[in-house]
Amino acid sequence: MAYSDKVVDHYENPRNVGTLDKGSDEVGTGLVGAPECGDVMRLQIRVNPETQVIEDAKFKTFGCGSAIASSSLATEWVKGKTIAEALTITNTDIVKELALPPVKIHCSVLAEDAIRAAIGDWKKKNNVAEAEGVAVSAAH
Amino acid sequence: MANNGVIISESAKPLPAGVTLPLYMDNHATTQMDPRVLEAMLPYFTGKFGNAASRNHAFGWEAEQAVEKSREQIAKLIGATAKEIIFTSGATESNNLAIKGIAEMYRERGNHIITQATEHKAVLDTCKRLEKNGYRVTYLPVQADGLIDIEDLKRAMDDQTILVSIMYANNEIGVVQPMAEIGKLCHEKGVIFHSDAVQAVGKIPVNVQTDNIDVLSLTAHKIYGPKGVGALYVRRRNPRVQIQAQIDGGGHERGMRSGTLNVPGIVGLGAACEIAGQEMEAESKRLIELREYMKAKFEKALDYVHVNGNMDHHLPGNLNMSFVYVEGESLLMGINDIAVSSGSACTSATLEPSYVLKALGLGDDVAHSSIRFGLGRFNNKAEVDYVSDKVIDVVLKLRELSPLYEMVKEGIDLTKIEWAAH
């Protein structure tokens, strides 16, 4: 299967690879997929508590080239967006941007799930913190 | 097993002597034809183009003579006699002819067939077809090292068993089954023993007498011969095996396989067998050295790698390795100027990992992380160095990207994580 140039570019030069401090309240972590299925994505966001803008995003992915490209692209897209804006990103946007073949649509779904999971984790942490008035270091 | 088709030119970088790109190291899939084989074949396309079945002129006699010479060359390589060799279009046809032909011929004696889980699809799918037609098939499991347990085979046999079909050497993991022992058991029970020996013939000593094999499939393109030609060995005595033809017509090949013989291809198959017989010992020694060298390089440079399949009963040129926490297809993408195969089938429509690796008890995660290297006659040490260095580089890079590798390094037990099913 021949990949699009964009997939190859993200595979060869993945953006925003790394790890954020998952203990921080400002950080939301999404871990989706399963090793048995051949792909696991971890996407992390660091959110400004005042503006709710995603100031940083990092990913690590075990998976095929399309999975790596989808998660790399997802980190690029969420950076600078507010939480609400980031939630509007869909897998079809990713499919279109990377020209993923039908058999790889699954990778884009996983990337969308990873964004949502990271945001969900951040929301959970911060709602809890607001309600109890203390910083909670959520184990994940 | 699949590779992706992306080829990026690396012509800018100087390559080590002995290495040209793209580099072929997938010799289980097919092999480059040996120029000596091509040379033997060429006259039979033009001047010596006769039909081997034409009995009334010199063109036919010449073709027939060439075909008979090939029969002898093949027979010599596997310890058979020339009359026991039937030409086919390749191993898939040989396997179909053997299994269906025996099943139909011996239907009155029984309807039970035994094979194993790690066979090639040409055997498995043929058996599945027979199941639809009223046959019973037992698919023997294999042990963690890829070998079948003879006790399992004994237990599977009953008074309805007419055929046991066990491949000689596996195309993915290179494991060589205990053929003589299996064959002996079959003969004691009066059961016909067929073997898909495509990967073994010409690579390791195969002898239908000492291995007690009754019917054997082989093909030319795995042994540096042409594609589209294969053979079936069918034992003529002790016991005499009969096969129901699957293609009817002119009654060629003792009625077992009609169709005008592919004379140039057959000449090529014979030449390939003769060369293999002469060079097997030296070639095998050289390939084992290269394979062990490659394996040692991986084990030295990387953690969490392991080899699949029993290495004491193994094809010389095969190395199937798992690079755990790295996905096979993304690894192939990083070495896309090198032809190898991945144990994950991520580029195919199914996305399922290899059923052979799963049969060894490997988890899907590890099966997704496996690569098959197939060394052959035309690979050299410089290529082995190039490939292993490049694979090591890409594995290191992908592990930097791998959340699983990071978690394991932090001491997290991946089996304790509740993975989101999707």
Image: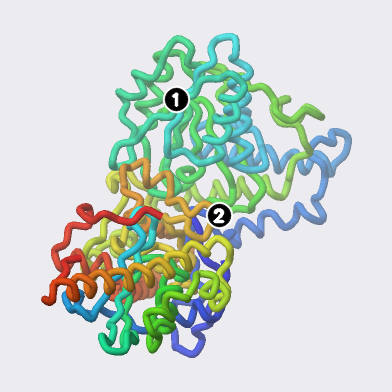
Can you give x and y, in whole percent of width and height, for residue B398 in the image? 33, 73
Q: Residue at x 34, y 83 (%)?
A: A16
Can you give x and y, in whole percent of width and height, for residue B295 in the image? 28, 61
Q: Nearer the viewer, mark 2 or mark 1?
A: 2
Rounded to the nearest angstrom, the CA distance separating label 2 from label 1 is 28 Å
Residue on which disc 1 sits = B138
Residue on which disc 2 sits = B349
Q: Residue at x 60, y 14 (%)?
A: B107
Q: Which secondary structure lies at badge 1?
A: strand
- Under mark 1, the amino acid is Thr
Q: Residue at x 26, y 60 (%)?
A: B305
Chain letter of the residue carrying label 2: B
Task: Using the image as rendered, state which of residue B179 and residue B370 is in the foreground.
Answer: B370
**What quarter of the picture does the C terminus of chain B occupy?**
bottom left
Q: Residue at x 78, y 43 (%)?
A: B62
Query: How is colour applied across the structure in the image?
Result: rainbow
Residue B243 higher or lower than B307, as above or below = above
Mark 2 or 1, nearer chain start: 1
